[in-house]
Structure formats: structure tokens, C-alpha cells
Image (tube, rainbow, N blue to C red):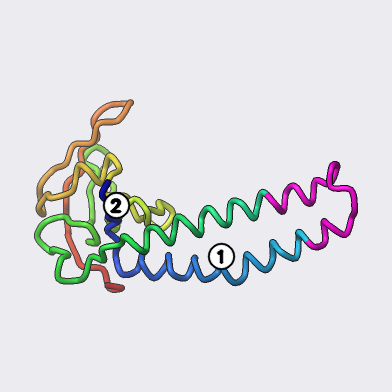
Amino acid sequence: MAEKVYELTVEGLNHLKDELDNRKVVRRGEISDRIKVALSFGDLSENSEYDDAKQAQGENEARIAEIEDILKNARVIDGDEISKTNVTLGCQVTLLDTETNETEVYKLVSPKEEDILLNKISSESPVGTAILGKKKNQVAQVKTPSGVLKYKILKIEIPHEN
């Protein structure tokens, strides 16, 4: 079976490397200290601190393995692949909601980089899927449970961090 390829922006790749380093160095140490303290309490059968620390350890190790897999199979989208004429992964796009006349600026990223609080939307999200490949001044229709939303693409740019 072929390995899944994860397309990432340079920023997303660096973020994952930083997270991996933090989890291996800082979080592992913190969790190890928590386990040592919990072990000093004695009886493990009723030791919720120990159970919590072991669960945190398992979750941390699972995330480390996930990040390592992503990095091993990553394909970095470089600046040359980001278009200013078509919406592509890694571009920054300004959208106009045709119903409310409000504009939003989003960066289109891979699902592994999505962070709606930072206006980074996944290329696999409903909006991301609808705008991918579109050109400036085209209207993308997004089907939602409450109806169809229409977004006009006002601007396509290469973000500064790439």
C-alpha cells in the first residue's frame, strides 16, 4: 500500500517540526516528572494522578508518531507552486460573501495545517473545496445545511511568510 503524501506549506512544515521538538523534549520530560511524582504516592490501583500521567504519555507518544509520519511523507509546496491567478494550496485569498457583503481573508492550507482562528482553512473544507482552482472575480458556491453560500474571489495573493 502506498504511503499517503501530505502536502504542506513551508510554514506548516516548520510548525510541525517545532511541535515535534517540543513534544519530544519538553512534554516528555514534564510527563515523566508527573509519573515519578505519582509513583511516589504508593498504591497504583487508586492513583488517579498516575492514570492521568500515563494517559497523557500515551497521547503525547501517539501525536509524536503522527507528526513523524506526516514529516516523513511530506511534500512541501514552495512559492513557485502558489499561483496569483488561480486559488491554490498555500495562497491567500480575499472572499466577498455576496449575501452579507462582508469580506474575509483566508490562507488555503492542507488539512494538517488548518486553524480557523488564524484564518487558515483546509483545502478539503467546504469553502476550500469550492474555491480551489477558481480565478479572481469568479463566484464559488458552498453547499451548507442552511443553504448555498456564494463567495466572490476578490484577490489571490502569495502570503508573505512563503
Q: Quadrant of residue 22?
A: bottom right
Q: Identify the residue shown where x is 45% and y is 55%.
A: 66
The dot on residue 23 is 1
The amino acid type found where label 1 is placed reads Arg
Whole-percent x, y for residue 79 in the image: 19, 71
Whole-percent x, y for residue 78 in the image: 21, 70
Whole-percent x, y for residue 103 in the image: 27, 51
Taking 149 as reference, is 109 above or below it? below
Question: Which mark is in front, 2 or 1?
Answer: 2
Q: Nearer the viewer, residue 148 or 66?
A: 66
Q: Measure the C-alpha gap from mark 2 to mark 1.
A: 24 Å
**Dot 2: element:** loop
From the image, which quarter does the C terminus lie in? Answer: bottom left
Taking 132 as reference, is 142 above or below it? above
Name which of mark 2 and mark 1 comes first in the sequence. 2
The amino acid type found where label 2 is placed reads Glu
Please, what is the dominant secondary structure of the magenta stretch?
helix
**Dot 1: element:** helix
Label 2 environment density (alpha carbons within 10 Å; few <14, some 14–19, many ≥20): few
Label 1 environment density (alpha carbons within 10 Å; few <14, some 14–19, many ≥20): some
Q: Is residue 37 magenta?
A: yes
Per the rendered image, the range of residues in magenta is 36-54
Q: Identify the residue shown where x is 17% and y is 49%.
A: 132
| Number of marks in the rendered image | 2
Residue corresponding to mark 2? 3
Q: Identify the residue shown where x is 47% and y is 70%.
A: 18
